[in-house]
Image: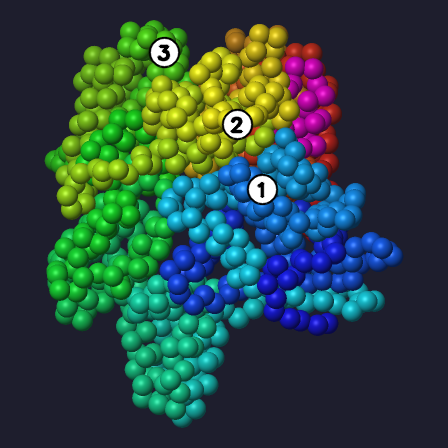
Amino acid sequence: MRAQEITFLKLVQGEKQFQVPLYQRTYSWGREQLKRLWEDVGELVDQHLSGEVVAPHFLGSVVLAPGQFQAGGVQRWLVVDGQQRLTTLMLAFTALRDHFGKSGDARGVDRVHRQILVNEFHEGIDRYRLLPTQADREAYTACIQSRADAGGSDNIGAAYRFFLGALAEGQEATADDRWIATVETVLKDLLSIVEITAESGDNVYRIFESINNTGVGLSQSDLLRNYVFMLLPKRGERVYQELWLPMQQSLGPKNLELLVWLDLVVRGHHKTKQSEIYRGQQKRLQPLAGDEDALQREIAQLVERGGRLLRIIDPRRETSPALREVLERLASWGGQTHYPLTLHLLDLVDEGSTTSNDAAEALLYVESYLVRRLICQTPTSNLNRIFMEAPKELETDRPAAEAVRRFLSGRRRRWPSDEELREAVRSKPFYWSGRPPQRSYILRRLEESYGSSEPVDFAKASLSVEHVLPQRPAASWFDLLAEETEPNQTPQELHDLLVHTLGNLTLTGDNAKLSNSPFERKQQILDSSALRMNQEIAAEKRWGKAEILARADRLTDRAVELWPGPIGGVKPAGEEWPGWAELRAALVAMPSGTWTTYGDVAELIGSHPVPVGTYLGSHPTVIGAYRVLTADGRISPAFRWADGADRPSPQELLMSEGVGFDPSGRARGAQRLSAAELATLLGKDVTQPASHDPLPEGEDAAAAERFRAQLQEHWPEASAGVLSVLDFWRVQGGYVTYGKHEETSCFPMLDAGTSRRPHLIWPLAIYPVSGTVEVVFQYLKDRTPFDGTEQRRELLNRLNKIDGIDLPEAKLELRPSFPVRVFAEHGEEICGVLDWFVHTAALDLAQRD
């Protein structure tokens, strides 16, 4: 085998084709991997534009083996390893080509297409420089050919859409005309790949197995330890026993690696990635080779920092009450984003450069910065970088708290003002912000601000977030909302704008009892609550728009006291409202063949349909703007393409993607993406209520009886069919479990694992009151064997052969639904699909064993 380091441009140039063998998995990179790659690209672009000397970024290796050769054809290479990187970069270049096209740069389009993507003098499959596995081929070629269905719901389409959005946002954020050209330079010439080529006749299957079945490699901290003690030939054993080993044992492997990285960051090496720890520390320590005293001091300093890291991880170790309290709050908040700044502040305390109280005040500003950004749904991009830069950038001639507040108040660091906070509490869907524990934390702190004489023990209380105005309200709730609707606004639209806002949310241990009950019933339950915020809600005479907004304002007053804002405390003039960036991201995230409404977008970003329409009307170049329709699924009469654009009508374009329209011009409802589905595509934690998902226990007789009674009451014609299908499921080896909500949902469960390693999967969720059956692709995509797009697509296609079921392919990562009444006449056909589901899962288990 032969190896060489090479740029991506040099790797792909020439009349060649990289074929991904059938034995490899389909393309599987998700949003997190794509974000990490793009952050690396962004850093290289910034360095290049600032005139720095830019070292190539090592992306990894690609292992190739000679493929079949035909005279006059392209040179074929089998991609033994590295197909994920190759495919990702090809999709990035495809998006770059199309970005050039949207900006009218025909030369850029031609250059990228011919240099990177295709063998221009060949036809058929020989034309493609990369040929993915057959399962991915259609989606990939749709992107290369710029077909209407490019950017579908699979991972290939999602990656293409991700890069389209990243390029559009990057161009929007910079006023530098060189930016897009620099992106092209970075992708072509500054991403380094090690090309490893096998000889003709080598067993490529054996190579693939050896690469992907190796033992556990050395961690970055293992490499550093080996290097350091190689430099300590005389006192290494003693230093290891007295210093390194106790530190290693107290921290554990993961935290030790975290410490070694934080040590570099706190020293000012804020651009160091966790994958480059060893190289960074080696470069720093190399000048000390031969000086064992100095090396021992370095290790002793690392041990001291390790003790401080343990105080961050486990605040009970902190002796200062003020500092311990705020460290406990940050630990409850979760995440490690703030660690570099927090560790630096503990360094200052232990060095005597600041007091514990001053550091505690500084960390209060850190907490406020994180909480306010979450409530305002400020994009988290650059958040890690901000905290990594902090130790180096803090002003040293000021008290620590003042320095931290001034640093975080910087113009581009986006610490929301009191005005922005008030606006967000009133309008943003807080229920989709951050992670569930962070939402609960904010509500808990707001409850604690009431200063009850008998505070709730939150550690013992089993509380969850409750919507006072229910997510699925009965008709009486809509009657109440109808009194407060604006002109041309329906009660449902008003409900959607209010239901997930902070003013409508509280904490309770009676979620199942409260459910979608009338407000009078909720008043009785909330009035007996020990939480002051619930008693306050119970004192209201009604619960509609006025009460929700009034409570939002009261909670904002408390939030401002709990979490002080930036210096100045006013909204920065001239800055774009972050909601518009979220709107653009949502439209890019929409798979081809889908549409949404102005109201759905407004609900997502915390706005109103009218300003959403105004924004899109004044920004006609926004990607995917043609996918936003009126509430009844029609093209808005006000829609216009950018001046001079010669393009098909929005309806023609949507139809070319596969969106159906009825004769009156209304788009097919099944292909509409709701606000919750848009949020899911953006990676927000849009959790169903816990009671809407399967309980961990087996079948419960009382819950089963409730389900049967509700089904019989609301859908008597489908009742026998549903119960017959559930009986069939049990015969196939599955079991049935139920939710604990007032509407007793039902889940046919299957354990496709072993006694030692359970692997629970379920295909459907049945709701007996609303009469909907959800197909839970959102969960299946994370569970084998349905984590592959082709298996979920097969499930969708089998279901769609049944009359009355019409699931759009664009929702293969969501929870599309069909009516429960389908069970009335098509129970046997549904049994056939479930039989296939069970056998597919069983086959996967046999292969894993």
Q: Quadrant of residue 170?
A: top left
Report crowding for label 2: few under 14, some 14 to 19, many 20 or more residues within 10 A (C-alpha): few
Image x and y of residue 478, in percent: 36, 10
Name the residue: 48% across, 49% down.
180
Q: Quadrant of residue 607?
A: top left
Task: Name the element at disc 1.
Answer: helix
As measured in the structure, the alpha-carbon distance from the residue carrying label 2 to the one carrying label 1 is: 15 Å
Tag 2: amino acid: Ala
Image x and y of residue 448, in percent: 19, 37
From the viewer's side, name the closer residue of 191 and 324: 191
Task: Name the element at disc 3.
Answer: loop
First reached walking from the N terminus: tag 3 or tag 1: 1
Number of numbered tags placed on the structure image: 3
When the figure is inspected, residue 551 is found, relative to residue 181, above or below; the finding is above
Name the residue: 56% across, 64% down.
192
First reached walking from the N terminus: tag 2 or tag 3: 3
> What residue is shown with label 2?
645
First reached walking from the N terminus: tag 2 or tag 1: 1
Name the residue: 47% across, 27% down.
642
Q: Is residue 796 magenta?
A: yes
When the figure is inspected, residue 571 is found, relative to residue 381, above or below; the finding is above
Tag 1: amino acid: Ala
> What residue is shown with label 3?
489
Name the residue: 70% across, 27% down.
797
**Which disc is residue 106 wearing?**
1
Report crowding for label 3: few under 14, some 14 to 19, many 20 or more residues within 10 A (C-alpha): few
Residue stretch rendered in magenta on the structure: 792-810
Mark 3 vs mark 1, foreground winner is: 1
Apparent side of residue 477 relative to residue 744 in the rendered image (left or right): left
Mark 2 vs mark 3, foreground winner is: 2
Image x and y of residue 200, in percent: 81, 67
